[in-house]
């Protein structure tokens, strides 16, 4: 079944090219705004998928700039702002929102401003929204807008942008990022058959996504995709956490998906082997091809700051195909709408 979701997943190379072109025009503004802000702290926020994006962005911003960075769901900032917005005047709030209209994200900005916060930047897909209009710096990827409720190309284009932002603020040469749309294209092509095969295997009743460092937020996002699109109960863990309890679920009806990093590859591959020995099926997104039952070869020539977004396209396809195998419509996840609007009385 052709669907918005499928065409949006497959058009990610173009959406990333749009993000790359946009960022090239914004680099000088980014540097100028950073010099103006000189924050002592960074808080990144969003809701649902964009909260998980915030987790990845915070990890990269802290490792690239050395400025302490934390990610919170917008609702936590609204209701616990008195303890989270300490020193708000010296804090940079980075909001991430496909729509720019999510009530909780807007309420979190208001709470930040009430606490004395002045500098808010946003990464978004729509111009001239309440969020974009409230931000001092807007990184806008209109080409990543989508019809489907579940975020795919909007998420990955915003994440790509967040990665470019973190690396730029960290003083890196980001020119290699121009190769990423082609790397995305190759991953989509190379993984298509295996993702369709694994997506069709409904003998998997439990699916776990494991990621360390910046990949933990990616693991959370693909967990949410599998939940939203395929109505599958699944979970995401930091890689080394899996032995501390969740591994009790390792069995023949369990698929463990490892987002293997260069830094912890030895430790992560041994966990995949241990879970395999306990009976679980394993899929590794890895630079080498002997870590698991199934492997997707990840590019080995991409720097670590640029890798997180590359794990998404194959696993979006996995969720898409599992949805189809269950007779579901991935464009319209059950009960969900593209944006959650809440009455102001909630806050
Ligand atoms: C946030 C969000 C999405 C989720 C669903 C409902 O939207 O929670 O993450 O997938 O679409 O809205 P936004 O603030 O990113 O537009």
Image (cartoon, rainbow, N blue to C red):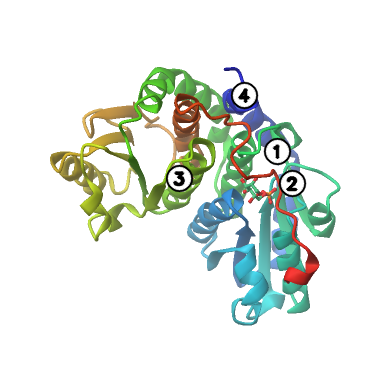
111 up-or-down from 330: above or below? below
- Which callout, 2 or 1, points to the residue nearer the camera? 2
Which residue is denoted by mark 4 in the rendering?
A: 11
Q: Which of the numbered marks, if any, corresponds to residue 223?
A: 3
Question: Which numbered disc, 3 or 4, marks the residue that appears first in the sequence?
Answer: 4
State the SS at label 2: loop
Which of the pair 132/33 is nearer the observer? 132
Which residue is denoted by mark 2 in the rendering?
A: 99
Which residue is denoted by mark 1 in the rendering?
A: 24
Residue at the spot x=40%, y=17% of the render? 193
State the SS at label 1: helix
Indicate if the residue with disc 2 has its beta carbon within 8 Å of ligand 1.
yes
Percent x, y of residue 218: 47, 46
* 205 lies left or right of 74: left
* 279 lies left or right of 287: left
Are circles 3 and 4 on residues that touch, CB within 8 Å? no
């Amino acid at each position: 079944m052709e669907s918005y979701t499928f065409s949006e997943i497959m058009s990610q190379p173009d959406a990333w090219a749009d993000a790359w072109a946009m960022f090239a025009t914004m680099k000088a503004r980014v540097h100028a705004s950073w010099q103006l802000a000189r924050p002592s702290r960074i808080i990144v926020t969003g809701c649902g998928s964009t909260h998980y994006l915030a987790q990845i962005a915070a990890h990269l911003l802290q490792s690239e700039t050395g400025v302490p960075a934390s990610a919170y769901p917008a609702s936590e900032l609204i209701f616990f702002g008195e303890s989270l917005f300490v020193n708000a005047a010296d804090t940079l709030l980075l909001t991430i929102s496909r729509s720019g209209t999510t009530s909780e994200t807007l309420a979190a900005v208001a709470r930040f401003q009430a606490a004395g916060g002045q500098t808010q930047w946003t990464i978004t897909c729509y111009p001239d929204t309440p969020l974009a209009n409230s931000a001092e710096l807007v990184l806008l990827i209109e080409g990543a807008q989508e019809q489907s409720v579940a975020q795919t190309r909007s998420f990955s284009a915003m994440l790509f942008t967040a990665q470019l932002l973190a690396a730029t603020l960290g003083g890196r040469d980001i020119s290699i990022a121009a190769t990423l749309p082609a790397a995305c294209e190759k991953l989509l092509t190379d993984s298509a058959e295996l993702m369709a095969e694994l997506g069709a295997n409904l003998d998997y009743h439990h699916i776990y996504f494991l990621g360390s460092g910046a990949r933990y937020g990616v693991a959370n996002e693909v967990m949410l995709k599998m939940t939203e699109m395929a109505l599958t109960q699944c979970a995401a863990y930091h890689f080394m956490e899996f032995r501390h309890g969740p591994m009790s679920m390792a069995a023949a009806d369990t698929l463990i998906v490892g987002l293997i990093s260069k830094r912890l590859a030895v430790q992560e591959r041994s966990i995949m082997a241990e879970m395999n020995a306990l009976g679980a099926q394993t899929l590794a997104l890895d630079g080498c091809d002997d870590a698991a039952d199934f492997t997707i070869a990840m590019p080995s020539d991409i720097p670590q700051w640029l890798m997180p977004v590359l794990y998404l396209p194959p696993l979006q396809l996995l969720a898409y195909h599992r949805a189809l195998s269950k007779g579901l419509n991935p464009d319209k996840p059950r009960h969900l709408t593209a944006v959650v609007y809440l009455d102001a009385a909630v806050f």
